[in-house]
Image (cartoon, helix red, strand yellow):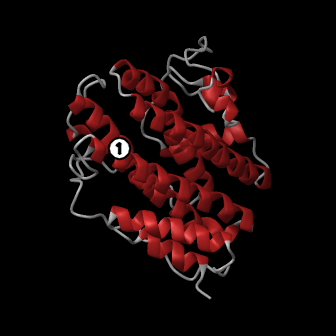
Amino acid sequence: MLSLGAAACAALSTPDPAAKVKAARAVARDWRCGRLDWRFDAAPPDRPPRGEHPLLLPPGRMPRRGRGGTLASRIALLHALAHIEYVAIDLALDMVARFGAGFPHAFADDWMKVAADEAMHFAILDRRLRALGSHYGALPAHDGLWDAAAATAHDPAARLAVVPMVLEARGLDATPPTIARFEAAGDAPSARLLRRILADEVAHVATGVRWFRCICEIRSESAPTAWKRLVESYFSGVLRPPFNDSARAAAGLTCEFYAAVAQGYAGAPEKFPSSREGQFR
């Protein structure tokens, strides 16, 4: 029987986006159906191979995007989101391949589901790009998300603290205003896709928080205290409001985590639609 570790590494090492979507879904399905053995006998790549497109640029050299009004700016936004979801497939697979041996089977259950979700998100965003006359790979992108993964490859707590609890949580803040921009431009189909993705991402951040708390409990450390220490050590950016506090709270990422390290945040009034208004349904 093929091992879970080898199957996850094979999907990680698939550079073609369409093939990676199929591989991630297949690994998740095979694990769910009991067709993979609980072994980790393959080493994940330090950096998954990428195809010729999109061209990967340093973050500082990325062209500026508009705010969603024109067709070109909406395509640029969707392309950036598609790239995030593409890298997120690898982040979830790497979580299993790199750290799974040290956790119970439920850890793999959770992160393989995340990998399948991210593959679906990428697929629907690429389909939307094609409907608008473009495709994934048509524009440049940057690999900052994987840089964060590389910096935390030695410690699952650091990985969870930075990737789901900082970078993916930032998506909870950025997505509602992005939805509003698409709606203002009359692009209801794109807005619907982002609402669907946002609901899943709340659950993904919650998965990160849950396993981070599990590690902290084993290490007899306060989760908010450990998170602040790890973020200060491994996250080079700055946390700034506005924060989607209701979405973060729904994911278990309460303000006791980020209030003390966020610049200019003092428990500002909620500025985003709440779940009661249908934002996360």
The residue sitting at 50% across, 21% down in the picture is 241
In this view, the residue farthest toward the bottom is 1
Q: Residue at x 38, y 68 (%)?
A: 19
Q: Position of residue 194 (x, y in %)?
A: 47, 36
Q: Quadrant of the C terminus?
A: top right
Q: What residue type is labelled 1?
A: Arg
- Residue 244 in percent (x, y) is at 57, 24
Q: Nearer the viewer, residue 167 or 92?
A: 92
Q: Tag count in the figure?
A: 1
Residue 223, given in percent of the width and then of the height, sits at 72, 41
Q: Nearer the viewer, residue 100 or 202?
A: 202
Left or right, 259 with respect to 87, comes to right
Q: Mark 1 points at which residue?
A: 128
Q: Tell me if mark 1 has few (under 14), some (14-19) or many (20+) residues whose alpha carbon lies within 10 angstroms of its own.
A: many
For the point 68% across and 49% down, the residue is 212
Q: Can residue 64 be seen in this view?
A: no
